[in-house]
Amino acid sequence: MELSLLRAQAHSPSYFSLLRGSDGERPPVDFCIPCNPYFPTPEIFEHLGRNLETILKFYPSDADTITAELSATMGLHPRTVAMGNGSTELITWIDHLLVRESLAIPIPTFGRWTDQPMETGKRVDMYPLLESRAFALDVNDYVSFVRARGSRVAVICNPNNPDGGYLPKHEVLRLLDRLIDLDLVIVDESFGDFVDAEPYPGVAAEAAVRPNVIVLRSLGKNFGLHGVRFGYLVANPALAGKIRDALPKWNLNAFAEVVVFMMKQCTAEYQESLRRLAQDRRAMHHQLSCMPELTVFPSQGNFLLVKLPHGFDGVALRDHLLTRHGVYVRECGNKLGTTSQFLRLVVRPQEDVRRLLVGMTQFLYSGSLHEVPVIGLHHRRPNSLSA
């Protein structure tokens, strides 16, 4: 494996880049890119495969047609929805069209929320989430920060990336009420479907009737289809229309159209995938928490943030896992608000997690626990924050 790929850019290299640099070795198990491992099902992939020639050969419908179908499925009015070629396209247009001078954002978080406005000359007011509070967002303190800095736009990611911290719905609504005078408040719910802390998370319905709120959602992350590149936003008709009018008429590909039109038929399979993933998240959190001196933070995303024991560096562990165990993880040294002592680990099925735990045990404990089966680590008392 060519490790220079991991050090040549600010963001993690794509899975395709790793495959090209693998020299025919077995593909790495991906604990880096947050993806749903249980969806689409093999049957859905088989359906897509049978229709591959048609999907690739012909033009997709225009964005309005695909958006109308998505809106009907999600119970939203199409005038309140704009679909993009991935959430990053929507973040870009939000910045260009709606962020005038300044934007407040808690850190650590998804890098495009800091990088995009800085690239266009905006002032980015970064509100530090504290490790001592498990990176939890305090609404009152964040509002005070926004007021003190005079920020005109405020953003939260819920659940947050990379820690998976979740702000309950009633607290999000309280934040929106207190910032109703801002130009814009954005709630990035890209990982919202993975939340199981309350029955009906998310504030998309409220965003559709509020004057200054945009909710961002990602279909690629939730559906396990990053390569399709599709996401959408929900806002009042004026805000949504401003973004929709700026987007190219054919900004969505045919794969996105096929998947959107399949959604109604796949609801049961999708909900089952979320249930299985939540179960895996609880198991993985417990197993990692049992590793001595490793801190595991509570998460409602499809990933877990861990802090390595004192004296260990995530870069070295990442390289060890990739070269010795074929496991690809996200080291967080280039994320504002964290250091290379932190790793973000995507939730995966147990057979993959065992491979991760063996590699981490070998690296962190110098062989002292290497003879202990990872399944037997559960008897140790967890030393981290509870999930």
Image (cartoon, helix red, strand yellow):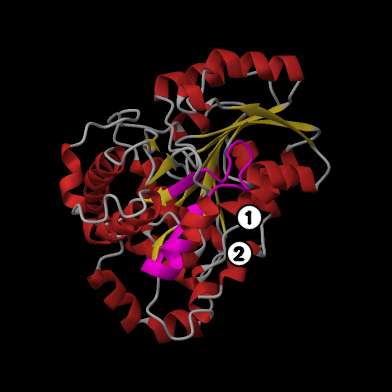
Q: Position of residue 154 (x, y in %)?
A: 64, 28
Q: Taking 177 as reference, is 193 left or right?
A: left
The residue singled out by tag 1 in the image is: 89
Q: Residue at x 41, y 25 (%)?
A: 169
Q: Secondary structure at mark 2?
A: loop
Q: Is residue 255 visible?
A: yes
For disc 2, the neighbor class at 10 Å (few under 14, some 14 to 19, many from 20) is some
Taking the magenta stretch, the answer to whether it contains residue 221 is no
Tell me which segment is drawn in magenta: 320-344
| Structural distance between the alpha carbons of marks 1 and 2 | 10 Å
Taking the magenta stretch, the answer to whether it contains residue 334 is yes
Q: Taking 123 as reference, is 185 left or right?
A: left
**Along the viewing direction, whichever of 156 and 132 lies nearer the viewer:** 132
Q: Amino acid at mark 1?
A: Glu
Figure check: 274 above or below 181: below
For disc 1, the neighbor class at 10 Å (few under 14, some 14 to 19, many from 20) is some
Q: Residue at x 39, y 35 (%)?
A: 295
Q: Which mark is residue 251?
A: 2
Q: Secondary structure at mark 1?
A: helix
Q: Position of residue 47 (x, y in %)?
A: 29, 76
Figure check: 123 above or below 233: above
Q: Taking 37 as reference, is 120 left or right?
A: right
Labels 1 and 2 touching (C-beta < 8 A): yes
Quarter of image, res 48 = bottom left
